[in-house]
Image: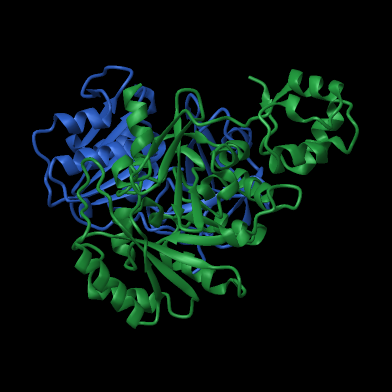
Amino acid sequence: MISHNDKQTTPVTISFSEELSTGIYLIGFKRTFDFEAGQVIGISIRENEARRLYSICSGEQEGEIKILYKVIEDGYLTPQLSDLELGDTIWITLAGGEFTAKPGPAVWIASGTGIAPYYSMLRSGLGENKILLHGNRYLEQFHFFDEFREVLGSDYIRCCSAESGEDVYHGRVTGYLQEQDELDPALMYYLCGSADMVVETRDILISKGVPFSHIISEIYF
Amino acid sequence: MREHLFGKTLEELKAVSHSLGLPAFTGRQLAEWLYKKEISSFEDMTNLSLKARALLKENYDTGIIPPVDVQESIDGTKKYLFEALKGKFIETAYIPDGKRSTVCISSQVGCKMGCLFCMTGKQGFQGNLSSGEILNQFRSLPEWHSITNLVYMGMGEPLDNLEEVLKSLDVLTADWGFALSPRRITVSTIGITPAMLQFLNRSNAHLAVSLHTPFEEERRKLMPVQQVYPLHEVLKEIRSWDFGRQRRVSFEYILFKDFNDSAAHVNELSRILHGIRCRINLIRFHPIPDTPLESPDEETINAFKEKLTTKGITTTIRASRGQDIWAACGLLSTKELADK
């Protein structure tokens, strides 16, 4: 199977680009290959550059593959990505990775743009029986609120650390989890986001009785 | 803070000389002083002109910085603590063993990889070390002249800091640098495949891969990297690589009680490593705070080794050293961070 590890990259033309909120962008290009929701692709601006991995942020059957990213000011790739315009070219790999969803109940936990694989899963019809815990600094960063809420209802829990809002937990994801009296140890817990969030969240889950074999993590590095 | 010279390549040192208007050969002289002699300041570089020494002092620091703390175990192992980024600490272990003495160096402050069994990951990621900061952990030890082996197995994932690690390997092995044999250096990785291929292409040092279970579904739960760089792809690349007769690949395997220590694990290890000339290095798990993992007893560890050996896989058990001095990687610096 060829994957994001493969040495080959393919040029694609940017067909969608939108700044969703300050510094957070969604870009897209025509889908020419299949993938599983939750997988990643490698992206570079030029053909022979080192690639960075990004989770796909669109459904398996959609015509465009989309990528959600936050501009890191001193980063290498994201400032260049944010300068791209429709019609520009980037280089991508095929999809790969194993952070994929199974039907059935599970808890999805994300911080920031770590929401991307879950959005792909939602758009691929895998949202039933899921609880989603999503942390962001600002309220405007819950970009896919309507779609998640439509499928998950009150099982879409927003945690906002810098602002208060109606029906929003004021604090981090980890704070929310700490306050829970009990967590269902039979469920699978999926974690996606920064290393700090994943490590801290995993420790909390384990301390509350969730077996580590029920925790699957993907770290953005 | 002035830029450090230590850790720069010969080409970079020549560029420094050029930028200061010094003769072209000053670059090579600097390399001699930095990497082959015992100096603590530019004043010690006695074959440089006074003008050159003054210019260097005005614009640069040597970058040779002593450790801030050391703890010594009853078994002779020493754990050195260096201040790297402001208020952050990295650990370096010096492990004497008869005629051999090994230094275990860090490549990052903290780590992003989030492995379940690792204390360093609990610090979060603070930053990458420069080539000079990596090499300083070797050069600034009082024992540096007697060190025979270097392993990049301290804090951080070396191949997540690829360019600085490769640069440090260049300085360690070049004739103008420390002129160490690459066969005395091992770089450990959890298996970031593209960077691993770069490392194999651009250096001759040994490779060690953190394996910890042959079953990919289990590995997902120990090591988040498995989600994006699965083991079968790491092994596929290693299998296709010509390591020659001198270069070695080894697999690190921490044993966890009732998790990865069964006969089924032995059989699967034998299957997935078939055709790879390698060895397995079994490691006892030193529990970290709040971990759900435990180490099996000695009998189980020895039996696991014997079964692998019977399968034809060269297997060693890493001696546990320095257990009385916060020896497990990340423990000492985390304690220091917490104390601050």
Confirm whether residue A45 shows in the render. yes
Chain that appears green: B
As displayed, is residue A141 above or below residue B306?
Answer: above
Give x and y (percent) for residue A106. Answer: 20, 49
Camera-side residue: A202 or A65? A202
Percent x, y for residue A121? 33, 50
Identified at 30% across, 49% down, the residue is: B117
Quadrant location of the N terminus of chain B in the rendered image = top right
At x 65% / y 55%, what residue is drawn? B180
| Residue A46 percent across, percent down from the top left | 68, 48
Of residues A148 and B156, the one nearer the viewer is B156
Count of picture labels? 0
- Residue that appears at 26% across and 18% down: A165
> Can residue A193 be seen?
no
Q: Quadrant of residue A80?
A: top right
Q: Quadrant of residue B142?
A: top right
Residue A188 screen position, x and y as percent: 20, 51
- Residue placed most toward the observer, A186 or A32: A186
For the C terminus of chain B, the quadrant is: top left
In this picture, is B243 found above or below B224? below
Which shade is chain A? blue
**How is this picture coloured?**
by chain
